[in-house]
Amino acid sequence: MNPGIGYAPVKPLRLSPREAEVLMWTACGKTSGEIVELMPITEETIRSHIKNICHKLNAANKTHATAIALVHGLIRATPSAEWVIPLPALFGLSEPPGNRASVQRLLPRRSKKSI
């Protein structure tokens, strides 16, 4: 496989509905153990599906298979609420700043030299 620019698969990429579902959950960050709780199949079956997916997509591992499937539109990973980081948390705050002084504390400091 040549993953360089212009790479195109030799034959059409197809996954079974079950393989696509397993890979979709993988793309959402779920482990095999977590997927077992979401689908009525065993962890051994999940590993088998992932092995088949990697073979079909000529992927080195499940992360590579996920990337190929996303690029080629075989699966869609829907963002979950767990992926959303509240804005105050980005700044290390437990709640939004309430006054101008606390907002200014977050802004980069300016040099006192005038230009």
Image (tube, helix red, strand yellow):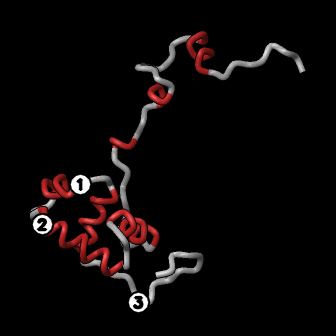
The quadrant holding residue 93 is top left
Secondary structure of residue under mark 2:
helix
Q: Earlier in the sequence, mark 3 or mark 2?
A: 3
Seen at 50% across and 83% down, the residue is 8
- Mark number, residue 31: 1
Nearer to the camera, 10 or 20: 10
Q: Earlier in the sequence, mark 3 or mark 1?
A: 3
Mark 2 lies on residue: 44
Mark 2 burial class by Cα count in 10 Å: few <14, some 14-19, many 20+: few
Disc 3 and disc 2: Cα gap in Å? 28 Å
Disc 2 and disc 1: Cα gap in Å? 13 Å
Q: Residue flagged by tag 2: what amino acid is it?
A: Glu
The quadrant holding residue 108 is top right
Residue 30: % across, % down: 26, 53
* Rendered position, 81 above or below 70: above
* Rendered position, 40 above or below 7: above
Number of disc labels: 3
Nearer to the camera, 86 or 68: 68
Secondary structure of residue under mark 1:
loop
Seen at 90% across and 21% down, the residue is 115
Mark 3 lies on residue: 11
Q: Earlier in the sequence, mark 2 or mark 1?
A: 1
Viewer-nearest of labels 3 and 2? 2
